[in-house]
Amino acid sequence: MGTLDVSLQRIFQQLIAGNAGLAIAEVDTYLAAWPNPQTKEKLDVLQEEYRLMTEYWKKGVRDPQLDNQYQRLLQRLYVLCANIAIHKHMMSSSYLQGLYTAARQPGQTWSITAIRREMEDFVSDVAMLELEPENKRKEKSKAIYQQHQQQMNGLFNYILTGHIWTEGIGVEMEEILLSPTVDSNDQQLVVSAVTLSLMNRFDMVKFRTLLNVYHRSQDEHVRQRALVGWALSIDDDWLTVYPSVREMVGELLKSQRACKELTELQMQLVYTLDAEKDTQTVQQEIIPDMLKNNQFRMTHNGLEEVADDPLEDILHPDAAEQRMEKLEASYNRMKKMQKQGADIFFGGFSQMKRFPFFYDISNWLVPFFMQHPDIAPIADRLGENKFLNGILTKGPFCNSDKYSFVIAFQQVMGNLPENVARLMSRGEVQPAEFEEEELQQPAYIRRSYLMDLYRFFRLFPNRAALCNPFDNSKQQLGMCLFFASELFCHTPLEKQKPEVVAMLRKKGLLQAADTLLKSFPEDMRDVQYYLWTEQFDVVLEMDPNHEKALAHCARKLFEEGNFGEAVDIYDRLLLLRADKASYMLNKAVCLVNMEEYEDALKLLYQLNYEHPDDLSVQRALAWALTCDGKLEQADKLFQTLVRVDNPVASDFQNQGFCLWLQGRIEEAAEALRTYHEKEGISHAHFLQWDVEWLLKRGISRTDVRMMEDLIGA
C-alpha cells in the first residue's frame, strides 16, 4: 500500500491494532500540526461518539450493540485517516497532483449519473453510426471516439486520484460495471483505475465492488481484470477494521471455479516476474538461432532477402531443409515458453513504450481497439493490411503491445523489401496465430492483462508515484504472493497451496515458498510439508523408513562428525535401496573418517568394479588407500584424477600428501602449489586437521613449516 510519514504511520498502527481511542488521539495530534477545518470537524464528531460510548461503558451497563458500534466507529475513523493519507500522497507527487487538478477542472462533473450517461450515450452513438450516410460516417465516428476517449481518460484520472468511496458510490459503480448497456472496454478501463487506486490505499467499498464484479460479470475480460484487482489489493492489515472481508471472500471461495482461477493467477504472477529472464533467453539463445537459419538479413536500408547460393545446393543439398528444421525448432521452443506462461515479448516491446501514445496513464491499460483516436489515423494510412489484422486479432500480444506494434509497424513498412510488403498486405505472409478458442480462455485473458500491468509498473516514467505490486525488493514476490494471506486460511483454497509451493520451490523461490508454508494449518502438515520445512525428525516419526529423511539425517550426522551414527543410517538406507551407489560411497567415506580402512576399501573396491568411470568413487578410493598407507596404488589413481578435464582442486592436495608420504618432496610441493592456486590461496598454509593427519603419519612440524615455505617459493 501507499507510503506514509511517521505521524500517519502511528495513526494507522493504532487502527491496525483496533484501538479507536488511541487512534483518535493520534489524529488529533496530527491535525494540530497539519490543520484542516473540515477534517477536524469530522474528527470531533467521532471523538464525541467515542466519548459517549466510553461513558456508557464505564457505568458497567452491557450494551449488546457495543461491539457493532465500536466496529463501525473504527471503520469511519479509518475512512477519515485514509482520506488524509490519500490527499497527502497526491500533494506530495507533482505528477499525481497534476492528474488530480486536471480531472477536477471547473465545469467538469463526475457524478454517477453523468458517468453512466456518458458511457451509455457512447454505445448508442456508435450504434447509430450505421444510419449515417457513408460520406459522413467516418468523420462522425472519429468525433464520437475522440470525445469519449477524452472523457474516459479524465474518469480514469479522477478515480485514480479520488478518495475512499461511499457505500452509495460503490453500489452505483458496481451497476455500471455489470450493465450490458455499457461498453466492455469502458468497464475494463474503470476496473483498472479502481485497481490502481485500491492498491495505493485500501478501500473496503472498492474492494467489495471488484469482488462482486468478478463474481457476477458475464464479460470474461471484465471478470479477469476484477479478479487481478482484488487479489493484488489484499491487505491483511485491515482485517481487524473490516472483519467482514473474511466472510465475503470465504463465500466466494465455495466456488471451485474461483479457487481454480486464483491458483492459476498466483502461478501466472510468478511467471510474470520472470519477464526479464525470459527476455534474456529469447534474445541470447533463441533469436540468434533463428537469424542464423532464415532467408533475410538486416542492413542499413532495412530487411533484405538473401539470394540462394547455387554452390551451396550442390555441396550441401540438405542444408536448406536443415535450416528450416532448426528455425522451426527455435520457433517451437519460443511458443512452448509462451504457453507455459513466459512473457517472451517484454524485451522487444519495452523499447516501444516511448511513443507519445503512452504519455497518458490510461493508455497503458486501455483495451485495444483500432478506433482509438491516437492510432485511428495510422490505421487509415496503412489501409487494409491482412498481416497487421492477423497480428491484432490472433497474435499472442497484450493490449499495450498491440498499440506499440501498430505505431511501430507504420514506421518500418517503408523499410521492408517491396515484395515482402506486398505479401504482408495481401496476407500471404501470416504471423504466428493462436486458436480463437484459446484467445478467449480466462487464463489467456488474465495473462494478457498481467503483461499490460507489468509493462506499466516497469516502464511508465511516473510509476514511482504509485504502489507497485511487482516490487519484490523488500520481500520475495512482495504483494504478488497473495496466496499467503490470512483471508485464505480455513477455506477451500488451502487445498491448492501445496501445488503453488511445489512450483515456487521448482523455480528457486525458497523464501516465498517458506512464507506460504507458514500459512499451512495443522491438518495440512503432512510428510511433504515436513520435508519442505526440513523437519526430518518429524518425518521419521511419521515414517521411520522414509528414504529422503534418512538420507538427510545421515548427511547431517556426517557434517557434525558423528560418523558412526551416520554409518548406521546408511546401513538402513542400503537395506531399502541396495542399488543406490551413493549410499555405499557415503558409508565408505564415513568409515575412512573413522579410520576403519579395511571395511572402507572393501566397499570402494566393489564400487570401483561396478562403476569404473565414476570419478567420485576413484577419488574416495585414492584417499582411502593414502590413509591406509597403500601409496603406490593411490598414486596411480591420483595421476588419472588430475589429468581429467576440469580436475577438482582437492585432488591436487590429496596427491600432494600422497607424494609427500613417499618422500617425493618436489613433486609434492608442485601438486600442493597447484591446489593453492586453484583455491585462490595467496600464501601457503595447512589447516590444523591436515597437520594432525600428517603428524600421525610421520611428518614432523618442521617438515610442515618447510613445505609451506617451499610451496610459497
Image: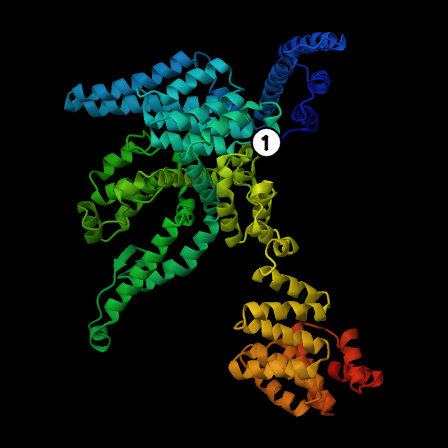
Q: How many marks?
A: 1
Residue 413 location (% of width, % of height)? 27, 47
Provide the secondary structure element on which disc 1 rests.
helix
Name the amino acid type tagged 1: Asp
Q: Which residue is mark 1?
A: 236
From this viewpoint, is residue 520 visible?
no
Residue 91 percent across, percent down from the top left: 59, 24
Q: Residue 588's spot in the image, x, y percent?
A: 64, 76
Which residue is at 69% across, 86% downward? 658
Q: Residue at x 33, y 45 (%)?
A: 396
**Which of the 4 quarters of the picture holds residue 289?**
bottom left
Q: Residue at x 52, y 25 (%)?
A: 247
Q: In the rendered view, does 501 fall on the left or right side of 600?
A: left
419 lies left or right of 463: left
- Residue 398 sits in quarter: top left
On the question of residue 629 being in view, the answer is: yes
Q: Observer-nearest residue: 177 or 629?
A: 629
Q: In this rendering, is residue 623 above or below 455? A: below
Question: Against 422, is 143 above or below?
Answer: above
Q: Is 308 left, or right, of 622 in this rendering?
A: left
Quarter of the figure with residue 108 = top left
For mark 1, does the 10 Å Cα neighbourhood hold few (<14), some (14 to 19), or many (20 or more) residues?
some
The image quadrant where one finds the C terminus is: bottom right
